Amino acid sequence: MLIPVVLAAALMNAAMVAASAVSTILIADDLSPALAGLPNTAGVLGTAVGAMVVGWWTGRLGRAHALRTGYGVGVSGGALTVLAAVGAPVALLFLGMFLLGVGNAASLLSRYAAADVVPASRRAWAMSTVIWASTAGAAGGPFLMAPSQSFATYLGLPPVAGPFLLAVAAVFAALVASTYIRAGQPAAEPELDHHEPSAPSRRTSVVLAAGVMIVGHLVMVALMTAVPVHAHLHGDGLGVLGVMLSAHTLGMFALSPLTGWLIDRSGPRPVMLAGLVLLLVSALLISQAGLAFTPALFLLGYAWNLCYLGGSAQLAGTDLESRVESSIWTVAALATAASPWLFTLGGFPVLAVISAVVAVPLLVLVARRTTPARVWR
């Protein structure tokens, strides 16, 4: 049944958004504003490591049990963040965010569980539904932060503890929802006869799909990390920046069901090609920083969506699921660190050139691939 997978993913995303937002405030007040990004870095690293761990659990416990274990780790992480908020050593906040990242990895990998519980002809649609639901959680979570602060005050706790209590409740609800997940067998590389000519072709198609996902995420994170800096340098207020970020987020998630339908109809390869082309077009438009800047951020978001879901569809049921997810979040950490430095060297044109350097060769390789022997449906 798809509903528990979707619900758990949405709840976990709401928890991550609430904890990530308030952890920066807690560190800025207790330590230094310069260190405010460290808790989120811990969350990113937890997601990268968690993807590998959840993948390992999947191979030994089955997918459903692996997801439940990941959400359980997330609950413990949320509890540690609450302790840090009420006066425990601040180191518990970093550990708590790291463990929440493991829960976040379970949420991200749950899209493959969604593919397990529907007919083959609707696998991509099911995965896209999980991605879309995660957005609903991310959008809904912030609206509960103010009431959660009031609730913490009512309990006699510091107001900052409220969003962390919200995160614990949301992750625990995700854990409960995950108990109803009935996924298929542990993910494993489909058995291929390596003496058949088609076997190397199948494997190459999967590796290229992994490359599309990683490059799509790299380009997206590198460009978007520089957007707030760009807005600030041009005197744009938070309202304008909010519109820019909202447009991008809308592109990332709103059209996910459409992407799933396209994949189920035509297969992953055309969708990945479209994603890479749109990635290059949006990078070019962003580098011009003109009137098309905000629409280009929407296009960049949808380019990521096409790359991420198209690649996920090709990877579903292989032994690369968790490894690629881990690589994506590792790349995100590196791109986040490098983007502002590169932006200071030459602005968006430099980032656009780098985007082309990594995306064009991959686009050529995917375009030259014939339809793989492994049938999508």
Image: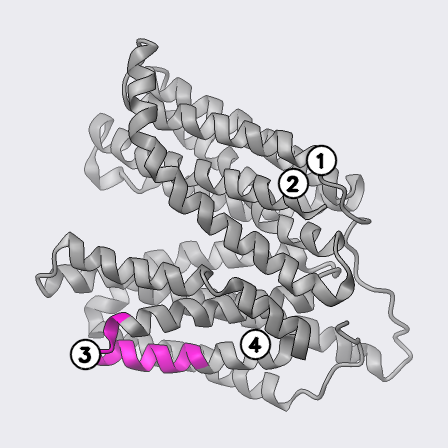
Is 371 left or right of 91, judged from the image as shown? right
- Tell whether position 300 is magenta: no
Residues tagged 1 and 3 counted as in contact (Cβ below 8 A): no
- Mark 4 crowdedness (10 Å alpha carbons): few <14, some 14-19, many ≥20: many
Badge nearest the viewer, 2 or 4:
2
Residues tagged 2 and 4 counted as in contact (Cβ below 8 A): no
Q: Position of residue 55 (x, y in %)?
A: 68, 48
Which is nearer the eye, 300 or 216? 300
Residue type at numbered disc 4: Met
Examine the rendered structure and indicate whether residue 109 appears above or below residue 31: below
| Residue drawn at (79%, 76%) of the image | 375
Which residue was labeled with disc 3? 290
Stretch in magenta: 278-294
CA gap, disc 1 to disc 3? 49 Å
Tell which circle, 4 or 1, labels the residue nearer the N-terminal end. Answer: 1
Which residue was labeled with disc 4? 272
Tell which circle, 2 or 1, labels the residue nearer the N-terminal end. Answer: 2
- Mark 2 crowdedness (10 Å alpha carbons): few <14, some 14-19, many ≥20: some
Residue type at numbered disc 3: Gly
Tell which circle, 1 or 3, labels the residue nearer the N-terminal end. Answer: 1
* Residue at the limit of the structure toward the top, as seen here: 156
CA gap, disc 2 to disc 1? 6 Å
Tell which circle, 4 or 3, labels the residue nearer the N-terminal end. Answer: 4
Is 362 left or right of 343, judged from the image as shown? right
